Amino acid sequence: MNAFPMAKSTIVRTILLGFLFTILPAFILCIVSEVWTIHALQRETEATYSTKITITSEAFSDNLNALQATASTLLLEHDVIAIAAQPTERIDLYALHNFANLLKLQFSSAFMGADVIVAFPQQGMAVSSKLGVDRLEKYPLLEDFSTLPAIQASWQLRPSYRQPERRCLSMLMGYVRPEQSFPVVILEIDCDELTRQMDNLFIPDVLMQSAFFRDVQGEFFTLDQSGLLSEEVLSALEEETKSGIGSGAYYENTGNARLKVTPVYLPDMGCVIGVAFSEQEIFQPILNITALLILVVVLGIAASIIYLFLVYRKIYSPIQLLTDSMRKVANGDLTVCVQVKGTNEFNFLAEQFNLMTRRLNKLVDETYLLEIRLRNAQIHFLRSHINPHFLSNSLFYIYNMIKSQELDSAADMTVYLGRYYRLGAQLDSLRLPLSQEIENIELYLKIHQVRLSGRFSFSCQIQKGLEDFEIPTLSLQTIVENAVQHAFRKLNSPARVDVLASREDGEVVLEVRDNGSGIPHEELASILERLKRPENMDELHGIQNVYFRVMTMYGEETSFEIKPVLPHGTSVVIRVRASKSHGKE
């Protein structure tokens, strides 16, 4: 006897093998911890740069906004308006020099060393907070105002209006047109001052880092002693900053150095200030750990793939094969045969499954044949039960009518009886269209109408479209005959039978209604009980036979009701779902 019987189990062996290739929980916890540490270091480094650049950019933006707001008030100054109103031939130089002193006093000691210039085009003069009063011709870019754009109220990197060879960050405020008469205000910040502002972005002890400033026109000013910001990087930065400012992106410069760029948008200015640093220098220790973790993950994935392949071969594939075969059996295919290689538990299950399908197939064949015999015996019994009894009664009534000299009635009844039995002789199938069933019923009721001579009436109504609806053969005929034979025994008034077929709420409703004496409540309950629980399945009569055949054809969801009709009478109603109907509708 084997000391380890579980070792023979394919499932157990597969699980144990998979466990050997699975990373132990402690090792998984270690990897998760390392990954979390790496991400935390990355987030902290990026947060340091982001915080520093945000603080610096906000201070830079506040200074620019304050400078712009203060300078914009100059256009409304009384002295500026008075000077601009002076005629060209009588310029008040004293007023100009007084205004220059005020301008120097207001702007020389603050606002990042900006040079504030107020130009008077009509007088041909300009006043600078740094250079004092000069003629406008000393500012080459202001000699012809027709060359200037109509609006320049934005910070841009462009040549200085006084020294075009020198680049600066400037803004022009005021209405500009070719024949300018009103003064304009020009703000210029030297690139050296811009360099001092951007130098605050750098983190100490980091060698590979650069800073940049981009104006609204896409022009760049860079502080790039490390040579990180190549033309390719600046082009990519221009596209990104045009489309929107994100949390940062990675780029590769001409030396294939991987850069991390963190830009910040300056509100209300359309400008961008940012910093770029070498990922290799900052994140090299982290990158080494990341590479090791990637290797571990790759090995773990490879082990998992091998494990899953083994699970598929040993467990999933046989189970799926058995499941698919069971679905086929559930759909009625009993010829399925499962073949599983090996001598494991799945092979045993496959053999038992095949044995089950063979036995089930044999049982279905036997049951089907038995059911067919039962249905044919019941139909033949019903027809042999109805036809001789009705024929003998009908011939007896014809005899009496002939003997009583009621020759016309006897002739009509003979014609109806002949047509009735001619149609009945053709009923060899288990079901027939509703129109043919109604034709038989009409002939049957006409025979009784002739026999009762004015004391009996009937109607047969079929909703259009239900003529080809198929029902069990002679089912409504049996209900009608039952009504004629039993419903009018105690009735003194004229008798009537109505046969109706209609659609209601997705159902086909078949109803036979009479105005007879009705069925007592206790007897009705007994009839309904016998319908559902016949004492002998081989001896079904009348309503029992109809109920059994209707349920056999349409299923247990079909409704079969027997209920009283006010003021007196009985109604038998059969409701069949339209989806379960046979034939055309």
Image (cartoon, rainbow, N blue to C red):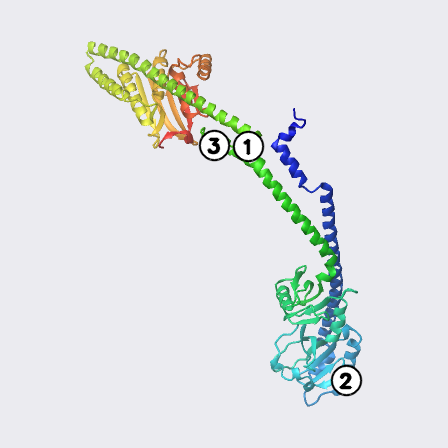
Residue in front for this viewpoint, 142 or 383? 383
Toward the viewer: 335 or 459?
Answer: 335
The residue singled out by tag 1 in the image is 342
Q: Quadrant of the N terminus?
A: top right
- In the rendered image, residue 52, in percent from the top left (x then y), is placed at 76, 62
Residue farthest toward the bottom in the current orientation of the protein: 89
Q: Could you say which is closer to the camera, residue 370 or residue 548?
A: 370
Looking at the rendering, which quadrant does residue 286 occupy?
Answer: bottom right
Local secondary structure at mark 3: helix
User: Under tag 1, what secondary structure?
Assistant: loop
Residue 526 position within the rendered picture, expressed as x and y whole percent measured from the top left: 46, 13
For residue 253, side relative to residue 365 (left or right) = right
Query: Does 197 sit left or right of 453 as displayed?
Result: right
Dot in front, 2 or 3: 3
Tag 3: residue type? Lys
Q: Which residue is mark 3?
A: 328
Q: Which mark is residue 97?
A: 2
Residue 100 in view of the camera: yes
Determine the residue located farthest toward the front in the rendered image: 1
Disc 2 to disc 3, how far (Cα)?
104 Å
